[in-house]
Image (cartoon, coloured by chain):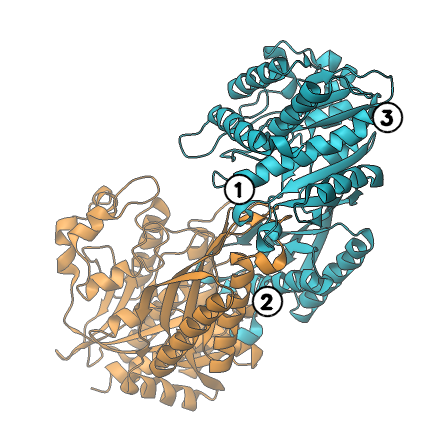
Chain colours: A cyan, B orange
Amino acid sequence: MHETLEDYEEDAGRMLDELYAIGAQSDGGTYRSLYDPSWVGARELIKGWMVERGLQVRVDPVGNIIGRLQGTTDAPIVATGSHMDTVRNGGRLDGAYGVVGSILAVGSLRRKLGKPARTLEVIVLCEEEGSRFTNHYWGSRSIVGQTTQLEAEESLDKAGVSLAGAMQELGLDPRNISSATRNDIGYFVELHVEQGGILEDEGLDLALVTAITGITRWDVTVTGEANHAGTTPMNLRRDALAGVAQMIADVENAAINAGPPAVATVGRLSVTPDQINVVPGQVRFTVELRTPDRNQQLATQSVIEQSLAATAAKRDLEIELKLQHDHEPVLMHAEVMNAIKTTLDSGGVPYRLLSSGAGHDTQIFSQIAKVGMIFTSSKAGISHSPLEDTDPRALGEGVAVLAGTLLKLAYRS
Amino acid sequence: MHETLEDYEEDAGRMLDELYAIGAQSDGGTYRSLYDPSWVGARELIKGWMVERGLQVRVDPVGNIIGRLQGTTDAPIVATGSHMDTVRNGGRLDGAYGVVGSILAVGSLRRKLGKPARTLEVIVLCEEEGSRFTNHYWGSRSIVGQTTQLEAEESLDKAGVSLAGAMQELGLDPRNISSATRNDIGYFVELHVEQGGILEDEGLDLALVTAITGITRWDVTVTGEANHAGTTPMNLRRDALAGVAQMIADVENAAINAGPPAVATVGRLSVTPDQINVVPGQVRFTVELRTPDRNQQLATQSVIEQSLAATAAKRDLEIELKLQHDHEPVLMHAEVMNAIKTTLDSGGVPYRLLSSGAGHDTQIFSQIAKVGMIFTSSKAGISHSPLEDTDPRALGEGVAVLAGTLLKLAYRS
């Protein structure tokens, strides 16, 4: 597909700019949240792009936009796509790049090769980030049959509007949610930016994704004794924050000792009573562990739990560790990975294998389809920020690899 | 004064109970904040106690209550007292014990010995804690001439009432603040609970205070880079919280290495953006160092500042250290300390020398008078809490030592 690399680069850049302008925020970046006016504007733009490229367009019962290129057989279809929503003050590429890339790739295949053997679909997912409601993966979960009318009625945004109510305002009927379910999808391929700094660090544009990380999260409460910070000698203190400082090091060391790509993070922390002159009596914090290796995930969970308990015991602190969730890693399917690999190898662009440290709609599709992902590098590893950026050449290369992969999966039945 | 030890114990207990009942809070403890109704109630109770014991009572222009026992000479007077206000949900003893103890001691001296050579005054200070306005030591600072009408007009409580306005509601004229200034006070002796656990830890009831701690406070801001907690490998992170965890250990180690009674505390801390799945980009926290040794204070300041800077450099973090204040220790006066020591030695109750880790009105009086303090033990070292408690025998012993000290200072001119 090399003859179109510059076209991909140019078209992708222009389309990403158009999409980024919808929902632009005065304090930087964009915000397209589920079912809001900017989201509707983006939907109309995307539908237009699909129609221009000869795809049959429809919007499913929850608002996913589907552009279809009918194939010559009834074999399970090949789908590609990403999400159209963004986080608050989001960037130009997260989700949007996979949306634009999918439309360009399928459009190009249709123009050059006509009808595929397997039907090709671009699926633009209506909600992945969960930044209005907390319903992550709402679009893809609806397609795999994991959402209900009840969920839509019980989910409220900050203004008190329910997800179901927001659907109705757009003319979508929450009673039809279950009819978004699909059983005809054989493959799902997603093109996405890395959102991390590994590719840039190694001077690479592209990665073949091997797995999506497993995630373990805990809420931790450490209780000591609040005391006067002037009159309580160091050896009579039960300082919850001093203990937690050691626990933060324990968490960091657990990930470093597990080795890349395992990561662990203490992201939230609050101190009680939070006074300059009072020894902290209680600290609450979160711990998150991510690794694509389930055995390592379980082993590192134990290391973290035991080291935190040991640090608490050493300092006479009480500790409560609440496991909030323990999501297993999702492996990419060998058949899709091979189609991507063959395309990458023939393209001559150097790449590496990489696991995804972030979650993606692809992990939801893995429940019903053979899945795969292609990553392009992120400048400075920055994502979920107006500073999100990728070299235009890499953007073009990613679209070309997606097109090559879809060709292999859909045209050679 | 041994013949009255049981009387002191009994009277002090009863008076403390009466005072504690004024301003009692439904959620525990008491709250007598400056110029509020409970404060007025306490004032009337205290004035009555003074009148009963034959003291001439007046209220000075800012609301300090003064009970005077006229001496036979014009020599600079001997004053004793403590503060009548409390923190929110405060305990039964902080401030109140010194108020009650002073009235009992001076009343007892008058009854047994009549007129002193030097005039004796019980000064009940109107505001030390600063828990309604932030004007710590308002009463004692007015006596040494450190307050102004402007300060009273500019200080607002949470309801927006100015300190000056609150004075006017009680019939106190803010234009007269400067006339609270005194130049006739030769000595000030304060009886107080330790508010720490050292005496109890050593099985002692009493301490002779040698100094009031120096206090150094910093606001610290550490800036790294906020990043996706899934896609940013450990070796590419600039995690502000992981760095601050090491800094908290640095602060703790600086105090431990300086040795008792030095203490250092990280009491406040906040994380940005404080998200479970984002590597912390910025952390703000406070550091407080206390030691009664000025040389150690300066040396430990350097240790803390250098170790924090080194930790920041090691982790490629930016650090901003803002020195908020650097208060030198205040030494007790040798003449007053000797009067206390002689009384203690003759009383036969074991005691130790101790520096105060908390601030007291005595440090303000040190600017115009020779000062000293006597501590009684605090159960479990607890203060600023409804759980504040001291053995009744120790309370009586403290009053007896105060009476003996005042006898030496006021009756032997």
Look at the image and tell me whether residue B404 can be seen.
yes
Q: Earlier in the sequence, mark 3 or mark 2?
A: 2
Residue found farthest to the top: A171
Out of A185 and B67, give the one closest to the viewer: A185
User: Which image quadrant is residue B8 in?
Assistant: bottom left
Out of A328 and B195, give the one closest to the viewer: A328
* Residue identified by numbered label 2: A238
* Residue identified by numbered label 3: A413
Residue B264 rendering spot, x and y as whole percentages:
46, 71
Query: With respect to residue B65, does B196 lie above or below?
Result: below
Chain identifier of the residue bearing label 2 in the image: A
Chain identifier of the residue bearing label 3 in the image: A
Q: From mark 1 to mark 2, how far is it between C-alphas?
A: 52 Å
Look at the image and tell me whether residue B56 can be seen.
no
Q: Earlier in the sequence, mark 1 or mark 3?
A: 1
* Residue identified by numbered label 1: A391
Residue at the location (48% across, 76% down)?
B255
Answer few, some or many: residues within 10 Å of disc 2's Cα (few below 14, many 20 plus, some between 14 and 19): many
Mark whose residue sits in front, 3 or 2: 3
Residue at the location (29% across, 87% down)?
B334
